[in-house]
Amino acid sequence: MVLANRPWRLVRDLSKVLVAIVGSAGFFVVNSNAWAIADTQDVGRLVLIAVVALVGLGAWLIIAHSLWENSTRTPDPALMRRINIATLLTLLMGLLFAYLVLYAVVLTAMALVVPSGSMSSNLSHDAVFEDYAAAAWFATSMAIVVGAIGSGLESDDEVRETISRYRPQSPGTQDESASAAPSPTSDD
């Protein structure tokens, strides 16, 4: 189910989330206050910030768009549990993939548009690769947080279709078309 949901396309297919994430990432790339905040963080705290941002966006998507299925109110609770697990795994893989891609893009953008002299003068020490890496990490995490705002602009149907492309139906349901595996498309 998770592979049929194509988690690597999660953020790309949620266009309003993507716009919010990329737009805010651009802001954080050139924001010297963000560089200074990142400069004061250790790796543990940067990891914590990233985890909180990713869990927050995932939880927001689940809650705001009613993606969690109540397994106690169905004739097949085991199926609903599998669907919920598939939803969680799809979100986890999709958001991690998006985070890694965004981090690479932000780090590249910082290397191209932020001169080391400018960063050095704002940090009051020579800027090295680790400073760029930390600033990009912080910018990526903050952009993911802003992505939660963008997810509120997506319709429930758009989010459900993106995260749950493949959902088997419980026995006895009317709609058998949703239980068929999606056909491959040229943009996979």
Image: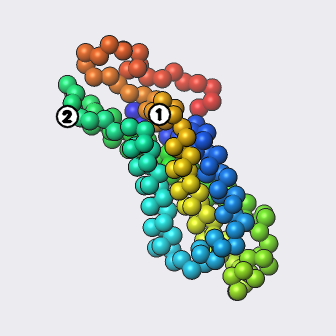
2 or 1: tag closer to the N-terminus: 2
The local crowd at label 2, few if under 14, some if 14 to 19, many if 20 or more residues have their Cα within 10 Å, is few
Q: Disc 1 marks which residue? A: 156
Quadrant of the image for the C terminus?
Answer: top right
Between 33 and 11, the residue placed more toward the observer is: 33
Q: What quarter of the picture does the N terminus occupy?
A: top left
Q: Give the CA distance from mark 2 to mark 1.
A: 22 Å
Name which residue type carries label 2. Thr
Report the side of 170 relative to 145 (left or right). left
* Mark 1 element type: helix
Q: Residue at x 72, y 80 (%)?
A: 122
In the foreground, 62 or 96: 62
Which disc number belongs to residue 53?
none
* Mark 2 or mark 1, whichever is nearer to me: 1
Q: Amino acid at mark 1?
A: Asp
Q: Residue at point 63% right, 30% down?
A: 187
Residue 38, image x, y percentages = 59, 74
Image check: 78 left or right of 38?
A: left
User: Residue 175, position in %: x, y?
Assistant: 36, 15
Answer above or below: position of 133 versus 71: below
Q: Which mark is residue 72?
A: 2
Q: Identify the residue at horizontal 58%, vertical 36% (top origin).
A: 13
Tag 2's secondary structure? helix
Residue at the bottom extreme of this rendering: 125
Q: Position of residue 125 (x, y in %)?
A: 70, 86
Circles 2 and 1: CB atoms closer than 8 Å: no
